[in-house]
Every structure is written in structure tokens, then in C-alpha cells.
Image (cartoon, rainbow, N blue to C red):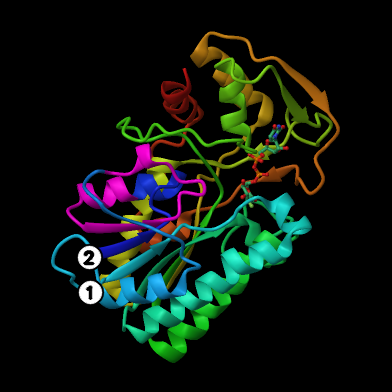
Amino acid sequence: MNVLVIGGAGYIGSHVVYELADAGHKVTILDNFSTGLHENVDPRACLVEGDMQDHALVRSLLKKGDSCDKHQPFDAVFHFAALKAAGESMTHPEVFTEANLIATMHLLNLMSENDIRRFVFSSSAAVYGNPEYLPIDEAHPQKPINYYGYTKLAIEHTLEWYSKLKGLRFAALRYFNAAGYDVKGRVRGKEQNPANLLPIVMEVAAGNRDMMQVFGDDYPTRDGTCIRDYIHVSDLASAHLKAMDYLVNEDKDLVINLATGEGYTVLEVIREAEKVSGLSITRETTERRPGDPADLVATSTLALDTIGWKAQYSDIHTLVSSMWEVYK
Ligand code: UFG
């Protein structure tokens, strides 16, 4: 297959590009390197440096097809190029409107114009909002509590309409907490100024940050800290390939959680990192962070039933040790 991966130099996108190239697919990356890293680009992929908000560029790319050699039309588009800081989405919604909503809507129109009918979309657990029951399945009510989550949900709704109206076939993959690094050690670029738990823990262990904060230890959980469903990025990558195969072979849409059904607390993550690194992680407990639910875990049985996917690398040891390989 000839595929376009928008955001293919980013954290999740770069892992998916490696998997796609391993499976023999021809990959073109479009990335503006706002957060993507050149060192994470698979050398087998062909690279277009540019912004997906540059509609003229996207139009010509989709029209021309891959820019590597033969200019064959794209069979599918993967889209990872979005903003993801939920807190910032509440203070600067306009930026999220442009980068997440408008850019994606334009992309869908340009795909339609060029008769490209397969789309693999990075959705998020944030489409659900506060859990009304656990574990979260795909039928859980969708009431995002931040604008970031709303942008993902609005795009999912547009995809449903374009499926009906334009014959688009889409996979919306609702990631829970992505973490870890390529189990084969190929992606090694570190996220700058991370806001998520695991890279912060790693930076403290590696001495790039003096200390970290644990946001609240009075939650109704086994040790008082929040529980999250961490999913290894190599598991996410394999799910993307299976999702594309599903669109091709079944010619049906797919909306699935990518999760493990098992959660770890903040302190369990920190302790595992101390064990793996042999170092102590300096921390202080602070107030709860606004908007954090105590517990967020999800079932992925639908992913197993539809695309035969199950997490393989998302146990806490593999998650943490694959990251320490990069950060140590
Ligand atoms: N945490 C800390 N200290 C830190 C950072 C995080 O204690 O310095 C805690 C948080 O309070 C939370 C847990 O670690 O309990 C995980 O926090 P993250 O920020 O890593 O992840 P979130 O669960 O808040 O958010 C993730 C994605 C979002 C997505 C959301 C969906 O990062 O993009 O899941 O539920 F929207």
C-alpha cells in the first residue's frame, strides 16, 4: 500500500511509520517538525517537510501521490498531526480549532476530491470525559470535559457523516495513555517539555529535571494516586496496521479503544522506574490537578474481536524499561 502519514516524525507517528515500512508499505511523511524530530524519521520513508495547515501543499501532495518516485496515488492516510495538551485547549481554544478541527476538515475534503477513501485517525480517551463506569467501553457516553477532547469527538462525527455521504472508510482509534519506546530501539528522540507522567519520571531519573510532583495522593485508589491505562507505543503501532488492513479487507468503519484493561497508579509507575533505573526519583506530593479522574481504564475487547489486536508490551516493566533505554 502507498500511504501518507501526517505527523510521521512525532512520537506515535514515527513508531507507526517503522511498522508500516517493516510490513512493506511505501510511506510518505508530511510533518512540520513543530514537535516531530528528524532523528525519529524512518530513513525508508520519503519526507515532505511542511504544515498540514498549508492547504495548497496538502492539495498538491494528495493530487500528485507519493513524492518518492513513481507518484502513485495514496491508498490511505494516517493522521497524527494534532495538538494534545488538554489544559492549553481550555485557555487557547482558537489554536486547537485551527490545528485540530479546521486542518482535519480540509484534509478530509481534499481526500474526497482526490478519491482517497481510507483514513486512520488518532482519537483519544478524552472523547469520553469523566468515567460514568469502569472499565470504559466504546458505548460509554461521550462528554468531553476539555476542548481537546471535543475536537477529537467532532472529527469522529464528521468521519461518520463522510462515511455515509462520501464512502470514506475510517478507523478512529481511541488511545488511552500512550507511553514507552520502540521495543526494537529504533525511535530514540525525546519529547521536549513533556507534560505526561512517564517522560517526566524519566527526566527526573536521568537527572534532566530536579524533581517531580505527584498530583494528589488522596484519591479513592489502592495507594491514593490516580490510576491510568498505559499503552505501549509499539502496541499502538501494531493496532494501526491492523486497522488499515481491516478497512481494506472488510470495507467497514472501525471505532475502537486501544487500552489494556489494567491500570497502574502514579506511585507504581514511579517505583517501577526506580527499580529499572536503580536511582531514586525525587518527588513531592501536591494538590490534585484539576480535571483528573481518579481511575481511567478501558476494555479493548472490541479491538480483539474486530482486528485481532491485544496489547503485548504494555506491562509496567516493558513500558518503563523501553523508556529508560532512551533516557538513561
Ligand atoms: N501526573 C503527576 N505528575 C506529573 C504528571 C502527571 O502526578 O507531573 C499524574 C496525573 O495527575 C495523572 C497521571 O499522572 O493522574 C497521568 O497523567 P498524564 O498527564 O500523563 O496523562 P492524562 O491521563 O492526564 O492524559 C492522557 C493524555 C491526554 C488525553 C487523556 C485522556 O495525555 O492527551 O489521557 O484521558 F486526553
Residue 67 x, y percent position in the rendering = 23, 64
* Residue 168 visible in the picture: no
Secondary structure of the residue carrying numbered label 2? strand
In the image, what residue occupies the spot 51% across and 46% down? 35
Quadrant location, the N terminus? bottom left
Q: Is residue 80 left or right of residue 41?
A: right
Q: Which mark is residue 43?
A: none
Report if residue 107 lies within the magenta region.
Answer: no
Residue 226 place in picture, x, y as percent: 72, 36
Which residue does the numbered mark 2 point to in the structure image?
2
Q: Is 314 on the left-hand or right-hand side of 249?
A: right
Q: Residue at x 57, y 73 (%)?
A: 102
Q: Which of the pair 150/136 is nearer the observer?
A: 150
Mark 2 belongs to which amino acid? Asn
Residue 168: name its quadrant: bottom left
Mark 1 Cα-neighbour bin, 10 Å: few <14, some 14–19, many ≥20? many
> Is 222 drawn above or below residue 308 in the view shown?
above
Residue 236: percent from left, percent from top: 42, 48
Give the image quarter of residue 146: bottom right
Q: Give the range drawn in magenta.
A: 17-42
Q: Which element type, helix, strand or loop, lies under badge 1?
A: loop
Q: Report the front residue among 123 and 249.
A: 123
Ligand 1 position by quadrant = top right
Q: Earlier in the sequence, mark 2 or mark 1?
A: 2
Residue at the spot x=29%, y=45% of the render? 18
Residue holding disc 1: 73
Residues at discs 2 and 1 in contact (Cβ within 8 Å): yes
- Cα distance in 3D space between marks 2 and 1: 7 Å
